[in-house]
């Protein structure tokens, strides 16, 4: 199947979102989780190729790159600095703290204030930044009062180490708790065409003009089977099901900031091309009726 042309495609074709009323973000971003080894553990097999993906993303107009200290761990942040420092004007690097990786299969929450302070300072060193534009609590820690974790980020903000605060993997109640303490400018939850379990969080973010970064944005699962509505829409647009799924996210809400990740330049270009797909009202209605896990 022919792909939409990717030469000189502006990421701004999907429009922009003004994060925190001051940071203009092109809505087709990039997630740097996959720029690591197998299982998001250790370095990639081809470090030069990983850096080229980042450089190509910026060439295509991406100005939001999302990462975390747990990706590798530390590897993703290191590669971003190697590939892009000194950073071009307007590039926003968002990172996260609050998950630790004692072994490959582990993703353990650690929301202790002392850990979050150390995590933020480590990210600043690896990214070669004096201040992180968007620092996100990676996940609530059931062993630590949520408000204490959020207050730790507020203190980092007061120290000038982070510019804006975001949350990840939270529900509406946690988001409301955090907003009683600090200004929250973004939420990053799992959300895609096949899994809309964060629908209430997205709706809250849309009402409050909070950026919503869907992780695992391209998942389609059984929805992409031949003969189904998703496959038919993809064929009509001369696109792949994954491209339609990404376009659906961009059409779904003006606060949506997808950050699809890949370690392959061709896949990156296909993702950016998806931002130019113009889904019709009929397309959106058909996709809305697909079976989802809510």
Image: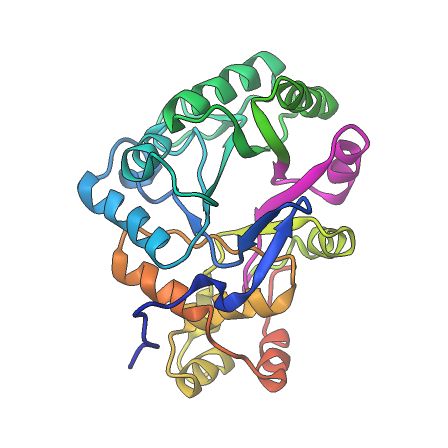
Q: Which residues are magenta?
A: 166-194
Which residue lies at the image location 26% right of the left edge and 62% below the top edge? Answer: 266
Which residue lies at the image location 33% right of the left edge and 34% below the top edge? Answer: 85
Total of numbered circles in the picture?
0
Q: Is residue 137 visible?
A: no
Residue 292: x, y in percent?
60, 66
Q: Can you name the residue that lies furthest to the right here?
A: 180
Residue 111, above or below 209: above
Give the quarter of the figure containing the C terminus.
bottom right
Which residue lies at the image location 42% right of the left edge and 68% below the top edge? Answer: 242
Q: Quadrant of residue 240?
A: bottom left
Residue 150: x, y in percent?
69, 25
Residue 170, above or below 293: above
| Nearest to the observer: residue 196 or residue 20 | 20
Residue 151: x, y in percent?
71, 21
Which residue lies at the image location 34% right of the left edge and 34% below the top edge? Answer: 86
Q: Quadrant of residue 5?
A: bottom left
Q: Is residue 224 left or right of residue 290?
A: left
Q: Is residue 174 visible?
A: yes
Residue 210, above or below 184: below
Give the quarter of the figure containing the N terminus.
bottom left
Q: Quadrant of residue 56?
A: bottom left
Q: Is residue 163 left or right of residue 102?
A: right
168 in magenta:
yes
Residue 223: x, y in percent?
48, 72
273 in magenta:
no
Q: Give the colour scheme shown.
A: rainbow
Q: Can you name the residue that lies furthest to the front here?
A: 89
């Amino acid at each position: 199947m022919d792909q939409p042309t990717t030469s000189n495609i502006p990421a701004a074709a999907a429009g922009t979102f003004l994060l925190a009323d001051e940071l203009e973000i092109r809505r087709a971003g990039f997630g740097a989780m996959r720029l690591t080894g197998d299982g998001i553990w250790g370095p990639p097999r081809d470090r030069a190729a990983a850096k080229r993906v980042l450089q190509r993303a910026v060439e295509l107009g991406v100005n939001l790159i999302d990462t975390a200290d747990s990706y590798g761990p530390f590897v993703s942040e290191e590669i971003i600095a190697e590939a892009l420092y000194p950073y071009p004007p307007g590039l926003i690097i968002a990172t996260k703290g609050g998950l630790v990786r004692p072994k490959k299969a582990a993703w353990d929450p650690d929301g202790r204030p002392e850990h979050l302070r150390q995590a933020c300072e480590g990210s600043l060193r690896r990214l070669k930044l004096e201040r992180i534009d968007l620092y996100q609590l990676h996940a609530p820690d059931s062993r630590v009062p949520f408000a204490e974790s959020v207050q730790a980020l507020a203190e980092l903000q007061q120290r000038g180490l982070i510019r804006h605060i975001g949350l990840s993997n939270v529900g509406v109640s946690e988001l409301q708790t955090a907003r009683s303490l600090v200004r929250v400018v973004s939420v990053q939850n799992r959300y895609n065409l096949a899994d809309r379990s964060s629908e209430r969080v997205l709706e809250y973010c849309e009402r409050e003009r909070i950026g919503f970064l869907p992780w695992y944005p391209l998942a389609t699962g059984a929805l992409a089977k031949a003969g189904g509505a998703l496959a038919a829409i993809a064929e009509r647009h001369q696109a792949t099901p994954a491209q339609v799924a990404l376009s659906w996210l961009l059409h779904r809400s003006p606060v949506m900031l997808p950050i699809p990740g890949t370690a392959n330049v061709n896949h990156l270009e296909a993702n950016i091309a998806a931002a130019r797909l113009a889904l019709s009202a009929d397309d959106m209605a058909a996709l809305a009726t697909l079976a989802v896990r809510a």
